[in-house]
Amino acid sequence: MSTTAVSPPLPRHPAGTFTRRGESAGQPGRVKARERTPAAGGHVIARHVDRGGRRREVVLLAGVAGSRLLVDRDESTMTDRRLIAHLAADEPPASAEAACRAYLSDPDPAGCRRVRGDDLRIAPYAELEAMAEPLAPGANGPDGLIGPDGEELALRLIPGCSAIPHLRWCAGAAGKCRPCSVREVVGRLQCYEPVRAITASAILSRWEDREVSVATLTVELQRLVGSRTVLNRGLRERALALVARGEVSMSEIARRCGRVKHDGHGIVSGETTWLARRLGLAADAPGKAPSPWVHADVLAIIARDGLGVSPREVELG
């Protein structure tokens, strides 16, 4: 199949899931995969429409020592290239598809950094060394990470779409666990460490292992690091501390951020519901839990204008 063939109109974000060749592509909300035929500057894996309505494509580019770069780029201009993952040479083709599927579950080019000129010349996972740390005995075992609800969170091998298992974060005891993303684990613990360091270390220790795939785990970690959606715990703790000391009210914080409301008598007050949701004190919808995440731009506004502090003071980074 030619990569220039005209395809049916694609759904807008959220794009649903990745469709492998041979599967039905006529279902609403699914993205049709392309055959891996040569295209200018890479092999096209899939096409999708981003949040801004722009048509984009996910491609594999050849890297150093047989490695491959999974890249999201503008379909027509082949510019605005974003690095999804750098896969080792030993990762089977099915791992690239799994990584693409993980990315397309929430396709947001802004969540991935731009491809740099040296990306095609550096070894896979070179950037992970800065955030990795040696795994101490028991750091990720049965007595390791525990969620706030007492559920165990650990890296485990689970069946993948290929013959080899995938290394993924899982919630629950061995034998009764379910896979979850790196972002979900960080969100449940409401802290980046030690999840980020443990994940990076695990990827580095397994990237030459032909019996285990770390492709999906790599995509999840790189998306977490590049995302503009950040944890709100530090912001929440600072706001509640100021309110508890009587230095400011929730209404005043919201007013300072430009979020106001008027009652029937024309009295102006701060929109505290908006603030509570951004701080992770209230849910966005009935039946849902408060979100541990806030966009970095919103965090900066609340910190700087609402609390009078530098955003850096409340970022957990």
Image (cartoon, rainbow, N blue to C red):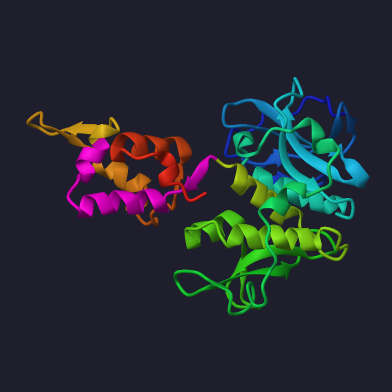
Of 108 and 238, nearer the camera is: 238
Q: Position of residue 248 (x, y in %)?
A: 20, 44
* Residue 21, magenta (yes or no): no
Furthest toward the top, the residue is 77
Image quadrant holding the N terminus, namely top right
Q: Hey, which quadrant is residue 179 in on the image?
A: bottom right
* Residue 230, magenta (yes or no): yes
Q: Position of residue 34 (x, y in %)?
A: 81, 37
The residue at 80%/53% (across/down) is 95
Q: Height in image: 201 above or below 284?
A: below
Q: Does residue 60 appear left or right of residue 194 in this picture?
A: right
Q: Hey, which quadrant is residue 90 in on the image?
A: bottom right
Q: Position of residue 3 (x, y in %)?
A: 84, 29
Q: Position of residue 81 (x, y in %)?
A: 72, 30
The residue at 87%/40% (across/down) is 63
Residues drawn in magenta: 228-254
Q: Height in image: 210 above or below 115?
A: below
The residue at 64%/35% (across/down) is 109
| Total marks placed | 0
Q: Does residue 252 appear left or right of residue 77 in this picture?
A: left
Residue 205 appearing in the image: yes
Q: Main secondary structure of the magenta part?
A: helix
Residue 44 appearing in the image: no
Q: Does residue 123 appear left or right of residue 316 in this picture?
A: right
Q: Height in image: 295 above or below 39?
A: below
